[in-house]
Image (cartoon, grey):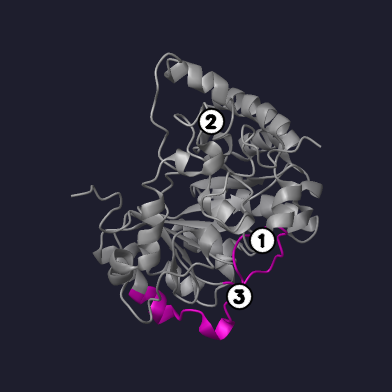
Amino acid sequence: MEKKNWLDAPDSVAFNVTNKCNLKCEYCFQNNNTKISQEASFEEVISVLNQLDSLKVSDVLLEGGEIFASPFIEKLLCKLDNYKIKFHVITNGTLLTPELVDKISQTNLSIGVSLDGHTPELNSQRGGKEVYYKILSAIEMLVSRGITTYVNCTVTKNNADSLDQLIELCNKLNVHGIVFQRLHCSAKADKNYFYNNSISYSQLVGFNSIYERAKSKYPHIYFMECELFCFLDAPERYLKVCNPDFEYKPKEIFRCAAGRKFCVITPNLDVVPCGILEDYPCGNLRENSFIEIWQNSERLNFIRHISKLRVDEISMCRDCTYNPICDGGCRADMFHYAEAWLAPHFLCPNSKSEGYKDS
């Protein structure tokens, strides 16, 4: 019997409680198509959390939209300690008030606040330069109350050259951690935006040096695993782990947790593999239980099938020297960018696709 490559129930779930948001970030990959009337009620949210708790899901990320724009967020905060689940929140920070922060401090929540640079200008794509100061105020309030707080930064060509200064700012703000995530191709970040705003290869090389130095310089800051570097320095990495005199099997294709250990629940209670694939519903919790969808969805099983493949299933990767160490990159990006699950990744500098731009 073929070995199963997915868990009986996910160990982590992201729950987009609302699509309401007070900002208009240019690159937001949330699909804000759910009508407010279709969004889950407070009672439905509690029912879903009860299901996840009974399945022993260990971590749930509450987000939006903007989670603090939810009309029942304060009522929800009061219920979280009823669960064995570890809850986390992603927020833009601009709706936080001292009263809300006080309520958060009475929970075990950790809070991720979106911040894309050390100046108002680098955050202006969120809805104006004044947003920057509201974000800083939110971080300062959270940290001052002893709440575990980290910064979530989307890396694009526009902020890539100044991320060392953002790290310095995070150190001054006494945040607990930093997450650097790649721009993904979905929703507002359509294929044209993705093409024109993705970090260049030379910028990536420079940021990698900054990132490694920062981890040594600021050991008290937790730098969460960075997805940006999957295509970086393939020749050097190959020589470290492979003997050129031997043949190696191509690596398994992009093995993220989507659909195998992790999934997302949208505001209208669709279950989707990840946040980039919100337009790929695998079932709805108003029609079936979570465990029925997780275990029986044809679409989730298709995603699991893809993750069993090896990189040489991607035609342009078949003869690549580096396919024993490269996983081919995010398949959800290529589903949107090239309309094909097994297209060569746009950002691979070694493929014959368009590749990184250095302009």
Residue drawn 66% across the image and 49% down it? 115
> In the rendered image of this protein, does residue 270 appear above or below residue 133?
below
Tell me where residue 157 appears, x and y as whole percent. 74, 42
User: From the viewer's perspective, is the residue at label 3 or at label 2 nearer?
Assistant: 2
> In the rendered image of this protein, does residue 94 appear above or below residue 5?
below
Tell me where residue 330 appears, x and y as whole percent. 53, 47
**In this figure, which residue is indicated by the disc labeled 2?**
320
Q: Is residue 54 left or right of residue 156?
A: left
Q: CA distance from mark 2 to mark 1?
A: 46 Å
- At mark 1, the secondary structure is loop
Disc marking residue 94: 1
Tell me where residue 153 appears, x and y as whole percent. 63, 46
Disc marking residue 336: none
Labels 1 and 3: the sequence-earlier one: 3
> What are the residue bounds of the magenta stretch?
19-47
Disc marking residue 33: 3
Tell me where residue 355 appears, x and y as whole percent. 68, 39
Quadrant of the snapshot with the C terminus: top right
Residue drawn 76% across the image and 61% down it? 127
Q: Is residue 13 visible?
A: no
Q: CA distance from mark 1 to mark 3?
A: 22 Å
Q: Amino acid at mark 2?
A: Cys
In-front residue for pair 312/236: 312
Where residue 340 sits, quadrant-wise, is bottom right
Q: CA distance from mark 3 to mark 2?
A: 40 Å
User: From the viewer's perspective, is the residue at label 1 or at label 3 nearer?
Assistant: 3
